[in-house]
Image (cartoon, rainbow, N blue to C red):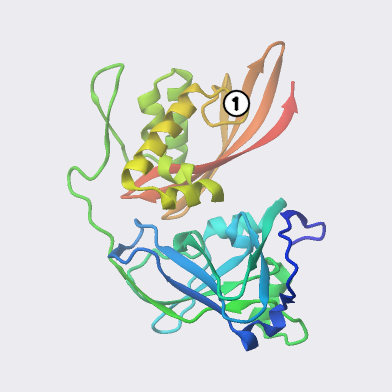
Amino acid sequence: MKKGFLVAFLTILSFTVPLTLEAAYATGIDFSIRLFDRRIYYAESDPIYIQVTITNNSPATFRFKLADERVFSLDFDVRTINNRLLEPADVLIRKRTQYQQVYFREITVESGESFSFVEDLQGYIKLSEPGSYVVSALMYPELYRSEFNRALVAGNSAITVPVLESKRLNLNVRPAIIPGPDGIPLEMDIVTGAVLVREHLAPDQVVDYMITARQKSQWERFFLYLDLEAMLSRDAVHQRKWISESEEGRRRMIEQYRQEMQTSTMDGTISVIPNEYVIERTQYNSTEGTVTVLQRFKIGNFTEIKRYTYILNRKDDIWVIVDYSVVNLGTE
């Protein structure tokens, strides 16, 4: 991270003597991982939830910092049976390289207590191929810093890297399910009464379709290429709530999110109607893409200019929007 790394935190007071990280392993701090829900996992489709647990078996108090965006507290090391290290996910790189405030809490684990949370492995590692893998986790009690990671990779003993490492976990991923004739979701067009079907559009065509539909207030067309589950889970707070909900609870969350989009007039949201837009740039590979769009919004006697960047994933050979960001460029 750059100098000027900003943090805000909540300090939890304790009158016991805290356990330093250097003494953690020697005195009984156990860091472990396990599959949160044991089931069959398929490539390119399923989230893979990992439960992370820190147990204090020592006689003293152990404290560590836990970021709201867990990528600043946690790493996963995933390797094939041939010891090939998998690459980090693009979303992880994006979160760690942008300048931002990193909010965290200081967690206190008393003697005999445990602290657990659940993370989706797909948010850390590119795991798109079937096979057998070995997974381990790294925990940064003092938060992730780029210099710590470089020291770990280089084996630089001159830099003391505060890190906890878990034991290995075996993971099997099966080939993706081949969709049948009804594999593509269907939506009914309220205007025409015809069935809407997701077509094999390029990423820029998907974005153009979505924005045009919004300008015409054609909501079924607007939502057709939006992955609402992915968009709803794009921040850490909503993702943790999603994990804890039942299937019925998740359906309610998506429906509520959809309704909020339809009624939202908040500046910078994806559902605000632009008067004009120009697609500036499109980049994509076989699985992921980005589309940058310059949009103009008429506000009274002036026009606001914003640059939207849409993130798309290719799922079942269909491009869908999974995330977006907005940059304000001023007015004219």
145 vs 33, nearest the viewer: 33
**At 72% from the left edge and 54% from the top edge, which residue is drawn?**
10
Q: Is residue 128 left or right of residue 232?
A: left
Q: Is residue 65 left or right of residue 236?
A: right
- Which percent across, then down, holds residue 129? 36, 67
Location of the C terminus (image quadrant): top right
Q: Quadrant of residue 112?
A: bottom right
- Which percent across, then down, holds residue 183? 23, 45
- Which percent across, then down, holds residue 163? 65, 76
User: Given the current orientation, which residue lies at the most extreme top position?
Assistant: 301
306 vs 171, nearest the viewer: 171
User: How many C-alpha atoms fall within 10 Å of the one at disc 1: few (<14), some, or many (≥20)?
Assistant: few
**At 51% from the left edge and 63% from the top edge, which residue is drawn?**
124
**At 68% from the left edge and 66% from the top edge, which residue is drawn?**
143
User: Given the current orientation, which residue lies at the most extreme left position?
Assistant: 181
What residue sits right under mark 1 in the picture?
Answer: 266
User: As displayed, is residue 66 above or below residue 31?
Assistant: above
Q: Amino acid at mark 1?
A: Met
Q: Is residue 94 left or right of residue 214?
A: right
Q: What number of labels is visible?
A: 1
**At 39% from the left edge and 48% from the top edge, which residue is drawn?**
245
